[in-house]
Image (cartoon, helix red, strand yellow):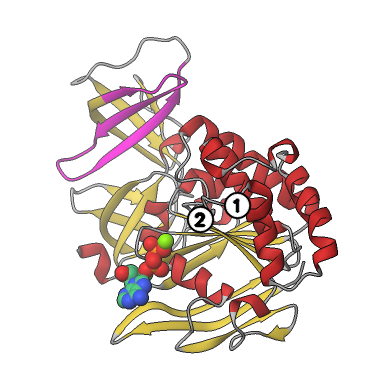
Amino acid sequence: MARLELEKLTKRYGEFHAARDVSLDVAEGEFVVLLGPSGCGKTTTLRMIAGFVEPTSGSVRIGGRDVTLLPPWKRNTGLVFQNYALFPHLTVGQNVAFGLEMRKVPAGEIGGKVKEALRLVQLGHLEDRLPRQLSGGQQQRVALARALAFRPDVLLLDEPLSNLDAKLRNDVRVEIRNLQQRLGITTVMVTHDQEEALTMADRLVVMRSGAIRQIGTQRDLYERPADHFVADFVGRSSFLSGTMSGDELRTDGGLTIRCAKSVSGPAVVAVRPERVFVGSEAISGQDNAFKGEVEFVSYLGGMIDIHVRLSPEDRVIAQVPNHDTSLPEVGETVHVGWAATSAVFPADAELRE
Ligand SMILES: Nc1ncnc2c1ncn2[C@@H]1O[C@H](COP(=O)(O)OP(=O)(O)O)[C@@H](O)[C@H]1O
Ligand SMILES: [Mg+2]
């Protein structure tokens, strides 16, 4: 258990930056998730922390000690991969013992530590099985036991749940989080799955193209996304684009949208679907109220998405609870409204992609 500090960690392959100036401070016992699309540099960053990839520049400190130049087995990090990476010809117990032997734990202590680690992941009874005699979820728990057996200062998890089916993924997600909290172990997990990230993390780090775009809690990212990319990647949004002057956005489709922030120039406003009210009468008491045509209704069970076209260029989605009332029909005219406090994002080149 220790604090983990990354300072301007960079990995270049030729001219290509797999990770660029990644700076991050993870507190003792904190669970941080690196979230971003495939290829954004999550694994590269994690492997630099573990010592399997040598940084081009920057530093890694664990518990205040600079470990940037140490080989993996000399830093006290436990790593769990997506594909378990268990040795097929070794038993569960031998797989867990392997990591301890690598770290030169005295032979007399290994048996006890293996049992303890397997007990932590509730697999004490399967010590003598071979990996192929276990389910995917059990194999992943063996990998977790192996990573925890030597009591690492930092636990590193690279998409540990992505090979499990949906139901099992939920169970193992809860197990990992409980275990992490119980042991109070500093943890960095990598995932491209926003739901997984949102449900497990104390804090999230959103990455794109090798760089950090935003660090924050679930609420920070959802309610105050730093930019268009974060707003799009975390949660869902309807984006309205146009030109800001003062606190008003004149959209490309000719609407005037009131916002809670003043910016000037091209901009994109993100409106979260659950913040949009919809009704058959004009919506009163909202800063923004428009009439539009229902383009699409999607029934999600507990929730219903109503896609409304406000102008040829502007569309919003309203997500409403399924309260057993009649739903608007496609083609029907409805009223929508939302508060000015919806986020505003300065436009930059990437918005015009
Ligand atoms: N050994 C390597 N040589 C060249 N490019 C690499 C190497 N490892 C990773 N990359 C590139 O770096 C980028 C980031 O990879 P990675 O960290 O694996 O992304 P993620 O885990 O977010 O999907 C990708 O474009 C990948 O192709
Ligand atoms: Mg990866």
Q: Main secondary structure of the magenta part?
A: strand
Label 1: how many Cα within 10 Å (few below 14, some 14–19, many 20+): many
Tell me, yes or no, whether the two marked residues, 2 and 1, touch with CB atoms within 8 Å: yes
Q: Is residue 252 found left or right of 114 in the rendered image?
A: left
Q: Is residue 147 above or below residue 6?
A: above
List x then y, in percent, for residue 35. Answer: 47, 58
Q: Is residue 201 visible?
A: no
Q: Which residue is mark 2?
A: 85
Name which residue type carries label 1. Ala
At x 25%, y 71%, the residue is 349
Q: Is residue 275 above or below residue 66?
A: above
Per the rendered image, the range of residues in magenta is 297-322
List x then y, in percent, for residue 140. Answer: 57, 46
Name which residue type carries label 2. Ala
Numbered label tally:
2
Q: Is residue 51 found left or right of 235 in the rendered image?
A: right
Looking at the picture, tell me which residue is in the foreground, 72 or 41. 72
Residue extending furthest left? Answer: 312
Disc 2 residue lies near ligand 2 with CB under 8 A: no
Task: Specify whether residue 313 is painted magenta.
Answer: yes
Which quarter of the figure has residue 51? Answer: bottom right
**Mark 2 to mark 1 CA distance (whole Å):** 7 Å
Q: Label 1: state its secondary structure.
A: helix
Q: Is residue 269 visible?
A: yes
